[in-house]
């Protein structure tokens, strides 16, 4: 029997109610992890838990207090990552429910409110929301992950979701600035955490038309529009394909696993070659 990459690990995944967060929570669970699915939408997080329950062909209550073999390793919590108490609560819930915490995936994020908006088109409210979720959320998740890992005696993995937009000017100027901040936080945490055996890395996706970011940014979510956006997005990547949530989840599961035990401070592009041009 093939050993699972995350057997016995406990993970918190923010933004687990959809997109990259859901795909990653599913992959983590499939590789043996017990997962706290955290999302500002509790309904979305609970749906992810139900999907995890199906992995073993059994279904049961997945929320706190649930019973059943699979429910014991997947729970949903509501978490607004811009609120410190919510972030601390999600991490505490993982440790209290499962006895420890090994992995924190700070994935939750919001897109540019209007795709194509230039710097001068952003309102102060737009700026504040992007900073609060995309940057403060990663700061809070990383800070409290480090504190808990150190209380536990060291070790632990932090993974953040950055973006190619944090490395090059690729539209969405304020969004890109928040992701550039995520990249720098990731490097800093990697260096500061290294003496305690704490690793920190980031995945940096390119265009992902299937994750809901396009719809949230103002493009229609109908099948025809999504297909057109996917073709256009794929054409921007040297490999010719858009990035999927599953692409990101595969990179994520490797980086949080012990196979990446000597990898830290890395900003891994999941971009079809976009940054290599």
Image (spheres, helix red, strand yellow):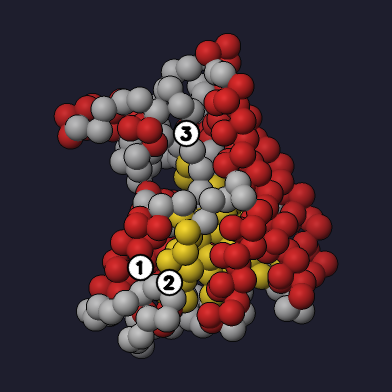
Q: Residue at x 44, y 18 (%)?
A: 116
Q: Residue at x 48, y 42 (%)?
A: 205
Residue 214 percent location from the top left of the image: 36, 32
Question: Looking at the image, can residue 169 be seen?
Answer: no
Image: 93 above or below 137: below
Is disc 2 surrounded by few (<14), some (14 to 19) or many (20+) residues within 10 Å?
A: many
Q: Gap between marks 2 and 3, in whole Å?
A: 26 Å
The residue labelled by disc 2 is 75
The residue labelled by disc 1 is 49
Q: Mark 1 and 2 residues: CB-CB less than 8 Å, in contact?
A: yes
Q: Quadrant of the N terminus?
A: bottom left
In depth, the one of 103 and 85 nearer the eye is 85
Is disc 3 surrounded by few (<14), some (14 to 19) or many (20+) residues within 10 Å?
A: many
Q: Residue furthest top?
A: 120
Q: Gap between marks 3 and 1, in whole Å?
A: 24 Å
Q: Secondary structure at mark 2?
A: strand
Q: Mark 1 or 2 closer to N-term?
A: 1
In depth, the one of 112 and 157 nearer the eye is 112
Q: Mark 3 and 1 residues: CB-CB less than 8 Å, in contact?
A: no
Residue 182 percent location from the top left of the image: 65, 42
Image: 129 above or below 46: above
Left or right of 121, for residue 215: left
Image: 50 above or below 230: below
The residue labelled by disc 3 is 111
Q: Gap between marks 1 and 2, in whole Å?
A: 6 Å
């Amino acid at each position: 029997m093939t050993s699972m990459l995350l057997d016995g690990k406990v993970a918190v995944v923010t933004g687990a109610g959809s997109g990259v967060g859901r795909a990653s929570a599913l992959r983590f669970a499939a590789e043996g992890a017990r997962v706290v699915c955290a999302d500002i939408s509790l309904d979305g997080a609970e749906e992810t838990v139900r999907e995890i329950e199906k992995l073993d062909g059994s279904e049961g209550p997945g929320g706190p207090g649930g019973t059943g073999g699979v429910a014991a390793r997947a729970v949903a919590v509501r978490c607004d990552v811009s609120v410190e108490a919510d972030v601390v609560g999600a991490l505490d819930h993982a440790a209290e429910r499962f006895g420890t915490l090994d992995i924190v995936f700070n994935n939750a994020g919001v897109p540019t409110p209007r795709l194509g908006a230039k710097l001068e088109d952003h309102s102060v409210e737009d700026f504040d929301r992007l900073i609060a979720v995309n940057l403060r959320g990663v700061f809070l998740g990383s800070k409290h992950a480090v504190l808990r890992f150190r209380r536990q005696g060291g070790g632990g993995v932090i993974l953040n979701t950055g973006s190619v937009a944090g490395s090059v000017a690729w539209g969405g100027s304020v969004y890109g600035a928040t992701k550039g901040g995520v990249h720098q936080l990731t490097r800093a945490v990697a260096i500061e955490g290294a003496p305690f055996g704490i690793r920190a890395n980031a995945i940096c996706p390119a265009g992902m038309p299937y994750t809901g970011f396009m719809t949230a940014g103002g493009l229609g979510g109908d099948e025809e529009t999504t297909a057109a956006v996917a073709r256009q997005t794929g054409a921007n990547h040297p490999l010719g394909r858009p990035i999927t949530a599953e692409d990101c989840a595969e990179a994520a599961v490797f980086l949080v696993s012990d196979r990446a035990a000597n990898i830290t401070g890395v900003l891994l592009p999941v971009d079809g070659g976009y940054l290599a041009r």
